[in-house]
Image (cartoon, rainbow, N blue to C red):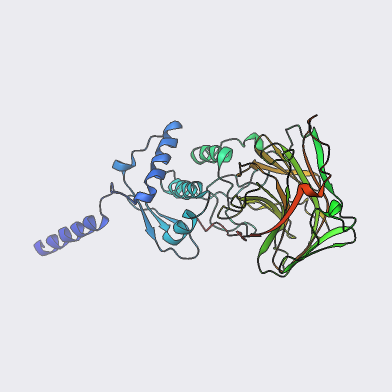
């Protein structure tokens, strides 16, 4: 009897010692600022956490199955972050918001008790940063988590009943009038006055006029952007502008992305893009970011034939249109001056462009149209195919 009692005591002691300290706080330095932000955002919304005393573990790990983070419901909560994924996103623009999104997501599980939520808003954005788990139509977990959307997603994290913000409506709520046409290329002839581009080969990329359209054929393995640089102070992406074109493509795969791009005149600057594919997917993004901001399904995209793509920049916001249907809005991530406008040709693809138009808000001291070929120069720039899917969460 006495022996059995001592065995029981030893067993209980072993169990207690194996459980560890339920209030242990052990967070890798790389994650500290995001834990502090989480506590600060929680406090703003009336939720007070003192995780340094209540306990939390966040550590690096080598996760499997393409997982970026993993929450273990232990005491204390233990979160693992894939070290390779963290290293990859650390090297690109937007890394801070991507890291915050990941840590907030996992803390949403462990600290707030949130489960995955895979519904969408009216404009197609994910409703919550808590999206994850089982795939929805094989859609990646890329969230346009920055600027005005960041405020909404943090609100929703702490209150699932947060109403959708006004910018997620599919109704166009801004005045899009008052843009004066400054350049129109119809591609009816081979004259540079009509094409903007010199019809010469650039390595493995050729240009020609076919059926009154500009035809660009690429033998490269990756995507390239064909850019027009407008050598005129009257057209500048720093100001409010309009840019549109009709575009068609013949690609290796229906998933290959093509579309329009715009940038400053500096080769060191990043490029903003608006790409689509034959699977009716839309990809807004910036070339310096880890991947496109988000992937959206848009029924306005024609799966065959041409699509008319248009962007309007109004007070720092880009408004996207497909075949004259307003589909999305988000902030631009390039802020320098300059005027590069063009389109993307995927590797091994052929793209046709027609009726390329550029406009700005009308002004009495600006000519109505770019008339001189001296105002236009041409370049071909490699576009990294940053089509990475955000890892599983």
Task: Please tell me whether residue 352 is drawn above or below residue 116 in the rendered image.
Answer: below
Percent of width and height locating residue 145: 56, 45
Task: Left or right? Give the position of 269 relative to 305.
Answer: left
Task: Left or right? Give the position of 22 relative to 107.
Answer: left
**Image quarter of the N terminus:** bottom left
Percent of width and height locating residue 357: 81, 46
Instruction: Identify the residue at the far left of this view.
Output: 2
Instruction: Identify the residue at the far top of this view.
Output: 364
Front residue of 229 and 114 = 229
Residue at (25, 54) in percent of width and height: 20
Front residue of 375 and 94 = 375
Instruction: Identify the residue at the far front of this view.
Output: 374
Tell me where residue 17 sits by quadrant.
bottom left
Front residue of 42 and 89 = 89
Tell me where residue 138 sits by quadrant.
bottom right
Percent of width and height locating residue 6: 12, 61
Looking at the rendered structure, the number of numbered marks drawn on it comes to: 0
Task: Please tell me whether residue 355 is drawn above or below residue 64 in the rendered image.
Answer: above
Whether residue 33 appears in this view of the structure is yes
Front residue of 58 and 186 = 186
Whether residue 122 appears in this view of the structure is no
Percent of width and height locating residue 203: 71, 68
């Amino acid at each position: 009897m006495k022996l059995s009692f001592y065995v029981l005591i030893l067993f209980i002691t072993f169990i207690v010692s194996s459980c560890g300290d339920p209030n242990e706080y052990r967070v890798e330095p790389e994650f500290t600022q995001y834990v502090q932000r989480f506590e600060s955002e929680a406090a703003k919304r009336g939720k007070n956490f003192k995780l340094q005393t209540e306990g939390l573990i966040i550590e690096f790990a080598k996760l499997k199955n393409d997982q970026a983070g993993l929450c273990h419901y232990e005491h204390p909560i233990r979160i693992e972050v894939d070290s390779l994924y963290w290293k990859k996103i650390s090297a690109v623009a937007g890394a801070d918001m991507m890291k915050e999104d990941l840590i907030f997501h996992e803390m949403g599980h462990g600290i707030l008790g949130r489960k995955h939520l895979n519904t969408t808003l009216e404009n197609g954005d994910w409703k919550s940063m808590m999206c994850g788990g089982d795939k929805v139509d094989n859609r990646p977990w890329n969230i346009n988590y920055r600027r005005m959307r960041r405020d909404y997603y943090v609100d929703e994290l702490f209150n699932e009943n947060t109403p959708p913000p006004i910018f997620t409506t599919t109704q166009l709520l801004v005045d899009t009038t008052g843009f004066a046409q400054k350049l129109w290329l119809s591609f009816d002839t081979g004259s540079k006055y009509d094409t903007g581009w010199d019809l010469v080969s650039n390595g493995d990329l050729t240009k020609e006029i076919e059926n009154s359209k500009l035809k660009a054929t690429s033998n490269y393995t990756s995507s390239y952007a064909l850019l027009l640089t407008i050598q005129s102070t009257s057209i500048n992406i720093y100001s409010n502008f309009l840019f549109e074109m009709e575009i068609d493509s013949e690609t290796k795969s229906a998933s290959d992305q093509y579309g329009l791009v715009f940038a400053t005149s500096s080769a060191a600057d990043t490029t903003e893009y608006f790409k689509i594919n034959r699977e009716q997917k839309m990809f807004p993004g910036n070339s310096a970011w880890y991947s496109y901001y988000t992937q959206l399904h848009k029924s306005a995209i024609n799966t065959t034939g041409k699509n008319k793509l248009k962007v309007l920049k109004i007070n720092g916001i880009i408004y996207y249109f497909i075949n004259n249907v307003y589909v999305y809005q988000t902030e631009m991530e390039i802020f320098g001056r300059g005027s590069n406008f063009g389109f993307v040709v995927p590797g091994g693809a052929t793209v046709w462009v027609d009726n390329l138009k550029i406009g700005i808000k009308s002004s009495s001291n600006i000519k109505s149209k770019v008339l001189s070929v001296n105002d236009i120069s041409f370049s071909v720039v490699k576009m990294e195919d940053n089509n990475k899917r955000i890892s599983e969460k």
